[in-house]
Every structure is written in structure tokens, then in C-alpha cells.
Amino acid sequence: MDKYSRATIREFMSPSNIGSIDDPSGTGHITDNADSVELTLFINVDAAGHITDAKYRVSGCTALIATLSVLSKELPGKAIEEALTIDMPYLSSLLEGLPESKWRCAGYAVEALHLAIEDYRSKTP
Amino acid sequence: MERIVYMDNAATTPVDPLVVEEMKPFFTEQFANPMTYMHSSMGDVAYTAVENARQRVAALIGSHPEQVIFTSGGTEADNWVLKGTLERATRERLHKPGHLVTTEFEHHAILHSALALQRQGYDVTFVKVGHEGIVDPDDVRRAMRPTTVLVSVMHANNEIGTIQPIAEIARVAHEHGALMHTDAVQTTAHIPVDVDALGVDFLSISAHKFNGPKGVGILFVRDHGALYPFIDGGGQEWGLRGSTHNVPGIVGLGKAAQLGRERLPGELKRLTGLRDMLLDKLSSRIDGIAVNGDMKQRVPQNLNIRIDGIDNEPLLLAMNEAALIAAGGSACTALETVPSHVLTSIGCSLTEAKASIRLSFGYFTTEQDIEYAADVIPGLVRFLRAMA
């Protein structure tokens, strides 16, 4: 049976790091009307290229909210190249297994991270 | 165990304890096959119980007992009437593919049966539905053809609860020489259902929607000669539906029908009051709330609302965490993450459809439950909106 783990539900009911960052190093924004998803991920990166903070605002499904929550806790302290290796199988494992039917929607979290890093790189000489 | 406030009665209802009591002996002591009644006193007990149940169902819908044919539920009844009438008329009268008229927002038991007929070469027209969730009989009239065998329009929609003008649509069908079917799964025992007043030739009922057991229903068949059997077998049900009778289930259906008939006037008034109370409270506590479908032509046990800026999936899950159970689309599509075909058929955008929840009430819903829902839902809406 394809269903949410208790870990996913706990994460969704008490999500970490919701909010925005003023003047962030990078921003990833996604809108998808078909999936009723609107998502912005903000990251701050220090001079050494390490992520120091991650926050997000989201309207979307349970899987996406829970995935963003665990992702935002994973990012601080990671180098950009390291952050880029975070993928859905890894995030799913942090949630004790996300139903595969929800991976596509939850995948917007990873996509937003890549957009935020791209934005950071475009602004960084 | 934590008390659960259950507001998903359109999906299924709890079996009434009085129904369970009446069913019990037919699992154990009175287990005989009713078809053995001629030579077995035990068989006669089972046979008599089945016929009593048939009379109780007939009394509920104003039919003759022999027009009540037991099935495994609403889905079988819907499949049977569509396939049985189309096949019979095509082979014996038309000698070319017959035509079915139905609507875009039917239950999947009808929609998918209609699509199956279409794959087999039959003609099907899916009539559009208005913004209020009501089918216009003139739209049905425009869909009629000389080869139209059957018109099938649900009595009330399973997601938005809107009641359809079945008597008028039946007149249109009959004027064009077609038969009329209605899926009354959401209305039976909730609002008056009378096969003559509705003017229908066929009507589907499912026991578990009105405090009976799952796995049993009926197809009302006005004229046994109008359709081929769907399940061929040992000649039960006048040769129209083979298979050993599900005696406990049929007995349960009969008891639920009797209770439903007795309770209907009081429940109609009580549930209408509770539903309107919940809508008033939610509307005063949540901004950006709207009702899907007409509020007047609606079964008393249904409230379907959309809430701006909300995705129903996390809202329903958060409600579940607060021990309040409701639904997004119908239970039959709960595994799919697609927006409701019913809501998109009445003009809702994909976003609006995904922002909608169905709260459906029943005999065991109390005013305390309504107060609880009115307290819990606004807080969860604020919780989700605060993330955006």
C-alpha cells in the first residue's frame, strides 16, 4: 500500500524553516498550476561556498511540504557541490520512505534547490 | 480509542447495530441456501428472509417486490443496466449499435461502463453539466437519437450532492422511446425516492450508503424483459442474476431499508440543519470559501466547499491527524492524485478542484461533531496558508 510514513506526517505537521530570507544568496521559484504548486526556496551561502541557511514558502501537497522541511535541515553546512548531490531517494530515506506516486511532486523541492544554486552562481563572480 | 469524527458518509456509512443484529443468525444457525426452500425448512427460513428484505426495499422505493433484483452493490447494478439494455436492444431490435446518453459527472461505475461500451462499438453521448451541478433536460433532449436505448443520469451527484431533475429527464427519454435509469446510491433513504414519481425504468441502490452492509445492493427493474442478465448462473432472481444469494447482506439491506424509511423525514430535516450550521460557521471563520454546486437542490448529507489557497490533500491529512475524517474527490478515486472530474465538469479550474473538500454526514453525525469540525478546520486552513 502506497501511503505516508509516520515520519512524513510528523514532518508535515511540524515543518521546520518555513519563511523567507531577506536578500538571499540564491532563490529558486516554481509555479505549477496543474499540480497546484507554488514554491520559493531561499538559501544563504557564505564566502567559502557553504550554505548557511535555507528557508521556503510553499503551497502544495503533503509530500512536498515534508520534503522541503527535511531538505532545509540538511542544507546548512553543506558545500554547494555537496548540496547538488541531494536527490529524491536520499530525501525519501530521511522520511522513512515517501510513496513513489508522490516523488514527482516532492521532486519540486530538489528542482527549487537547483534553481536557487543556479541563481546564486549567476550572482557570484 | 480516540473518538473519530467521521464526515465521509458519502463514501460509506457504519452499519447500524440493529442491522448487524438482524444479520447475525444468517451467518451461523440460518446458513442454508434459500433456493433449497422447497425441500428444506432451513432453506425456507433463508428464502423467507430474502423475500422479506425484498419487500422492505420495495416499500422504500415504491416498487413491486419482484422488481427489486439483488446485486453485489451499486457498481454491479450500474454495469448491468448499461450493458444489459444496450446489448439486448442492439441484438433484438435495432440490429445496429445502440446509443447511450449519460452525463459527464456520473460515478465511475457509469462512466467507465459507458467507455467500455464505446470500446465495443456502441455510441455514447456524455451530456455536459451546468455550473450549479444540475443537468438540463433540454441538453438530454438534444442528445437523443432514434437509436437511443437508455438514458442514465444519477439522482444526486456523489461528490457535490446536487439533485437532478430525473422525472423531467425520464419524460424526455420516454418521448424518444428510450428507457430511463438513475443511480440513486446517494439519495436512497436520504431523500424521498419513488420509482413511479421519478418515472424510471431502472434504479441502482447500494446498502452501505445508508447504514447497511457493504457488498449488497439492488437494481430496480420495471420490466424483466428489458435487459439481458449480467451474471449468468443458477437461475436466481428470475434468471436475471445468477449466484447464491448473499443472505446476511440481503437481510442487512432489508433492515437498513426499513430503518431508512422510518427515519427519513426526521433525518432529512436534522441533517439539513446540521449541514447549514456547519457552512455558516465555516463561512464566518474562513475567508475565501465557496460551495461547489447548488445549495438548494442538494441532498442533506453533503457539503462540498472550496477554500482559496489550499491544497485539499494536506488539509485532509491534517484533519485526519485531528481525528476528523472527510474526503477530497470520491473515495473511489482517492488513490489518484488527479483533480475531481465532477468539479472540473461543472467549470472548476484544476486549482479550484484541488482546493475542494467534501464533508458528508449521516445518521450518527451529531451537533457536537459539527461544532468540532467548525473549530478544527479554520485552524488547519490558517496553518496551511501560513506556509504560503
Image (cartoon, coloured by chain):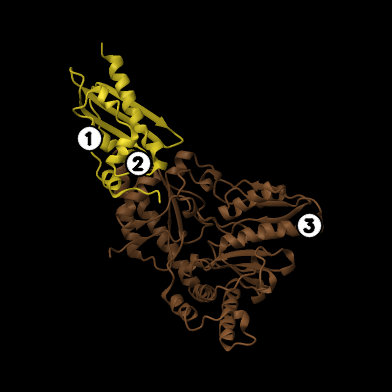
Chain colours: A yellow, B brown
Query: Separation of disc 3 and disc 2 at Cα?
Result: 52 Å
**Which residue is painted at 62% across and 79% down in the image?**
B35
Image coordinates for residue B70, horizontal then vertical, percent: 60, 70
Mark 1 and mark 2 on one chain: yes
Mark 1 secondary-structure assignment: helix
Mark identifier at residue B91: 3
Q: Which residue is mark 1?
A: A73
Mark 2 secondary-structure assignment: helix
Q: Which amino acid type is marked by label 3?
A: Arg
> How many residues crowd around disc 3 within 10 Å: few (fewer than 14), some, or many (20 or more)?
few
Image coordinates for residue B146, horizontal then vertical, percent: 79, 51
Q: Which residue is mark 2?
A: A63
- In the image, B45 versus B345, the foreground residue is B45
Residue A73 appears in the figure: yes
In the image, is residue B22 above or below residue B146?
Answer: below
Image coordinates for residue B108, horizontal then vertical, percent: 56, 52
